[in-house]
Amino acid sequence: MLLTKENVIEVLKEVVYFPKGGNIIELGMIDNLNVEDGFVRFNIIVDDIEDDKNNFLVETATKYINDAFGNIKIDVSLMLSKTNTLAHIKHIIGVASGKGGVGKSTVAVNLAVGLATQGMRVGILDADIYGPSVPIMFGTEGSMPETCERDGKTFMIPVEKFGVKMLSIGHLVSGETPLIWRGPMASSALNQLMTETDWGELDFLVVDMPPGTGDIQLSLAQNYKLAGAIIVTTPQKVAFADVRRAANMFIHSGVNVPVLGLVENMAYFTPSDMPEKKYYIFGQGHGDAFAKELGVPFLGQIPIDENIAAAGDKGTPFSFSNFSPVTAAFEKLAKTIIDKF
Ligand SMILES: Nc1ncnc2c1ncn2[C@@H]1O[C@H](COP(=O)(O)OP(=O)(O)O)[C@@H](O)[C@H]1O
Ligand SMILES: [Mg+2]
């Protein structure tokens, strides 16, 4: 049989999940199926990763694929379904970068606002435990999330502003406290923000990922069924090595998170009194070329605008308060993301 995505799906229809009396395709248990260069990768979504029955699913699926296509490379992972709060979120999107200061939070926040402006139900989770900036950028530093009880469990209710539901460690602790946390504490705080929050029905949850490519980033990508990742870079070549690592974490580490594309932030400068001019301070076309090299779509350029920093500091996301090439750029980015799903 020819190794195509369609044929793999046909084969996986033979794999029956007995507890639910159906095959794993019709039960919607397959996620992020990727067939490329003789390499098949996908996740099987289950309620319990430790359950032996579920390992049996992996073995059966692997065997059937090998029987049908010969001894090809297969990477199947079990993934925990988040039945409670995350089940009502259609798409979780990570905004990542190997480096801090490239504008990850700026892109995440303005993308969230851009999506909300276009009628989407949007949340943003500030996963940058060590350097939370979502509360500052939204002007919600002082807001403590309220809580509610459901089935004997306590859930946080996200803070809401500009049509976006948000939660950050910055809403829960003040000052510099998170900076001294050790890895496991940071991870468990992050899990709580994610799963012990009543996000309600969302079309998109944008996750402002912490910079870097360590355990926190990897487990975020692995545990939460990210529908895709947006990688942010600046045009300077020095940033590329870090950004490449971030992209490769999604592409090659077996987490099966598709990279939706690369955003080039601070791509050029347009003086507000000469809106038709574009000054490519760091050179032109770097972002596009870099996206090609990584083999991911190029999602576009965000210009440098001194008002972005001012708006971020004032607590009104730029794209909510202004109309300029920058707003247009974020609007286009939001549209592109909506079109991808
Ligand atoms: N396109 C831009 N034009 C002007 N300033 C920007 C732009 N993007 C980001 N900034 C500013 O650069 C700083 C770093 O951005 P931030 O989004 O916090 O980066 P990161 O989350 O990657 O650390 C912030 O002060 C922000 O306001
Ligand atoms: Mg940030």
Image (cartoon, rainbow, N blue to C red):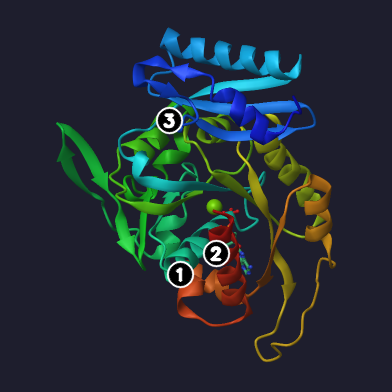
> Mark 1 highlights which residue?
118
> Helix, strand or loop at disc 2?
helix
**Can you tell which of label 3 and label 2 is closer to the viewer?**
3
Q: Left or right: 286 with respect to 177?
A: right
Query: Quick one: quadrant of the N terminus?
Result: top right
The local crowd at label 3, few if under 14, some if 14 to 19, many if 20 or more residues have their Cα within 10 Å, is some
Residue where numbered disc 2 is placed: 334
Ligand 1's quadrant: bottom right
Circle number at residue 294: none
Q: Earlier in the sequence, mark 1 or mark 2?
A: 1
Tell which of 227 and 323 is nearer to you: 227
Q: Position of residue 143 (x, y in %)?
A: 28, 57
Question: Could you tell me residue 224's position as x and y percent?
Answer: 47, 35
Position of residue 272 relative to residue 239, above or below, is: below
Q: Nearer the viewer, mark 3 or mark 1?
A: 3
Residue found at x 76% / y 85%: 277
- Neighbours of disc 2 within 10 Å: few (<14), some (14-19), many (20+): many
Q: Residue 339, position in %: x, y?
A: 57, 60
Residue 14 coordinates in the image, percent (x, y)? 54, 20
Residue 249 visible (yes or no): no
Q: Nearer the viewer, residue 264 or 314?
A: 264
Amino acid on which disc 3 is placed: Leu
Q: Earlier in the sequence, mark 3 or mark 2?
A: 3
Amino acid at the residue labelled 1: Gln
Give the left or right position of residue 230, taking residue 234 as reference. Answer: left
Q: Is residue 245 above or below residue 290?
A: above
Q: Which residue is mark 3?
A: 27
Mark 1 and mark 2 residues within 8 Å of each other at the beta carbon: yes
Instruction: Say which quarter of the image contains residue 272.
Output: bottom right
